[in-house]
Amino acid sequence: MEFIAPEIEAYAENHTTPEANYLEELNRETNQKILIPRMLSGHLQGRVLSVLSKLQKPKNILEIGTYTGYSALCLAEGLDTEGELHTIDINEELEPISRKYFDKSPYGHQIIQHIGNALEITPTLSKKWDLVFIDADKSNYINYYNLIIENMNTGGLIICDNVLWSGKVLLEDNQLDEDTLTLKKLNQLIQQDNRIENLLLPVRDGLMLARVL
């Protein structure tokens, strides 16, 4: 489902700060060599993540779901000069491409990659997070949210990607697959969570922003 007409999206991109050269190269290589390249955040969503991170000025960022590293690089643009971004992915085969572009950027020394199960790795990091981006297996989104919410600093921001899931969240529960049902439950959980204030942005496939009170 397209939430915005392609012509409007193209106009928006044409009136948005261009992506850095290394992001453009990463975008191209992902589309040429990697399966399911639509998983990459891309120019418009990448600039949204960049601006949010710059406004937040985080010292500690957690990303659950690295893929080829585009979103991590966008989030890293707002990092405190002494800050760190920890990014976790279960697919070790993608690590070489993401690391290559991390090291091409000005932020490579601040980005720490972890390969494995995020539910197991995250508790070992012993951090209080200023910004968290969740973009991994949808069936575990609620588990990820519950895992990190108590380890957020006041004013910290949680961003969940794909929360509209091509519009399937509008279907009745008895029509939903497991991933869609989990995303629908997550949206309701966040809506009712009095620890945060939230905003669901219909950017690409939906970004849920939850700011910790």
Image: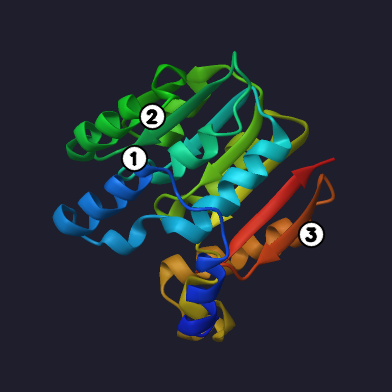
Asked whether 170 or 54 is in front, the reply is 54
x and y percentages locating residue 161 in the rendered image: 52, 57
Against 97, is 205 above or below? below
Quick check: marks 2 and 1 in contact, CB under 8 Å? yes
x and y percentages locating residue 206 in the rendered image: 56, 66
Quick one: SS at disc 2? loop
Q: Residue furthest left?
A: 33
x and y percentages locating residue 184 in the rendered image: 58, 69
Against 38, is 8 above or below? below
Asked whether 108 or 66 is in front, the reply is 108
Q: Amino acid at mark 2?
A: Ser
Dot placed on the residue nearer the N-terminal end, 1 or 3? 1
The total of numbered circles placed on residues is 3
The CA distance from mark 1 to mark 3 is: 40 Å
Q: Nearer the viewer, mark 2 or mark 3?
A: 2
Q: Amino acid at mark 3?
A: Gln
Q: To which residue does mark 3 refer?
A: 192
Q: To which residue does mark 2 refer?
A: 105
